[in-house]
Image (spheres, rainbow, N blue to C red):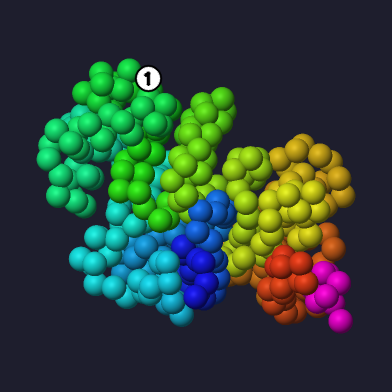
Amino acid sequence: MNDYALEIKNLKVIFPNEAGIVRAVEGVNLNLQKGECVALVGESGCGKSVTSLASMNLLTSPPAIVRAEDIRLCGESILGLPDKKMQAIRGKRISMIFQDALSSLNPVMTVGKQIDEIFKRHSKIKRSEARRKSIELLKLVGVPDAETRYKAFPHELSGGMRQRVLIAMAFACEPEVIIADEPTTALDVTIQAQVLEVLKNMCRMKSTALLLITHDLSVVANMADRVYVMYSGKIVEAAETYPLFTNPLHPYTKGLMASVAGIDDEAGSTFVQIPDTLPNPMRKPQGCYFNPRCKYATEKCKEAMPPLKTLDNGRQIRCWLCAENSN
Ligand SMILES: Nc1ncnc2c1ncn2[C@@H]1O[C@H](COP(=O)(O)OP(=O)(O)O)[C@@H](O)[C@H]1O
Ligand SMILES: [Mg+2]
């Protein structure tokens, strides 16, 4: 028995359309240990949200076609569970927090009632008890004057307060896993930091595993224990946060780092100078998907996709130029 809260094994998602096939996720393996905070980073459109939605069985099919070897929650397979069973798991054992609190919250119901509802949906509990627990949660996530805010409607709260309410809702049933998809992208930088701090503290306090999805590498530095870097539907690098930041190995990760820090180092400047964004998901380049943007690319890189190699220290990298891969 391993100690994984969530395991995603060989997940593939495609969206067929008249013009061709969008290969959004191409064989992603990702896991979270119990209580661990793991970040999934990469540019917009690389497949982060589709990875999380597909693993929670939240993609509409058609158009999505989802295949996986397995998806396991605390060792139990949840792949292909009927909708009813999945619904019971979502919110209770796995919660999701999205970027846009206004569209995640019901505009005509007070925030307090919305938290109460989660308690009531997943356990037999009296109304007064639900209310007490909701207010306690609002206090925990740092909502000042929680009794009054309990009675507020979503539009009466600031963006940061609404995001705290979503965090409270996500923790209501003390789930084993929380998936937060760009949870603070819509907020000002200072508020972002405060909300992330709340999320981190709540996860620590409740020993909840967190999958933090973001396009912004700077967000993960203080949050994550480990990071997966995704490019065009594939994981290209995975490492613990400190080694990843101090010694990024993949040219794409180096570029991401440099663009965050505003550093004009070799790899970074190449990456930043090339205006090209992600490859067209219907016409990905031959070989390594990053090769057209990579200044180190060789003939081999243009011909064949490198495998995701696990190094002796446990880091993973998908690059022909990595010493272990090149011979
Ligand atoms: N419902 C959909 N139908 C068709 N293509 C989609 C759909 N949802 C996402 N995609 C495509 O899948 C790819 C990955 O998207 P997404 O996971 O949302 O990226 P991000 O990393 O920004 O979260 C993109 O090319 C996107 O256009
Ligand atoms: Mg997304």
Task: Name the spot of residue 217 as percent of width and height, x first.
Answer: 64, 45
Quadrant the C terminus occupies:
bottom right
User: In the displayed structure, does residue 54 sit left or right of residue 123?
Assistant: right
Quadrant in the rendering for residue 323:
bottom right
Q: What number of labels is visible?
A: 1
Mark 1 residue element: loop
Q: Is residue 102 magenta?
A: no
Name the residue type under label 1: Pro
- Neighbourhood count class around disc 1 (C-alpha, 10 Å): few under 14, some 14–19, many 20 upward: few
Which residue lies at the image location 36% right of the left edge and 44% below the top edge? 171
Q: Which residues are magenta?
A: 319-327
User: In the displayed structure, does residue 5 sit left or right of residue 121?
Assistant: right
User: Where 280 falls versus 115 (above or below)?
Assistant: below
Task: Name the spot of residue 257 as percent of width and height, x first.
Answer: 74, 46
Q: Depth check: 83 or 2 in front?
A: 2
Q: Depth check: 1 or 87 in front?
A: 1
Which residue lies at the image location 31% right of the left edge and 31% below the top edge? 136
Q: Is residue 320 magenta?
A: yes
Task: Name the spot of residue 76 as percent of width and height, x first.
Answer: 38, 73
User: In the displayed structure, does residue 90 sit left or right of residue 84?
Assistant: right
User: Where 21 falls versus 5 (above or below)?
Assistant: below
Residue receiving disc 1: 144
Residue 192 visible somewhere in the drawing: no
Task: Name the spot of residue 274 as percent of width and height, x first.
Answer: 74, 51
Quadrant in the rendering for residue 321:
bottom right
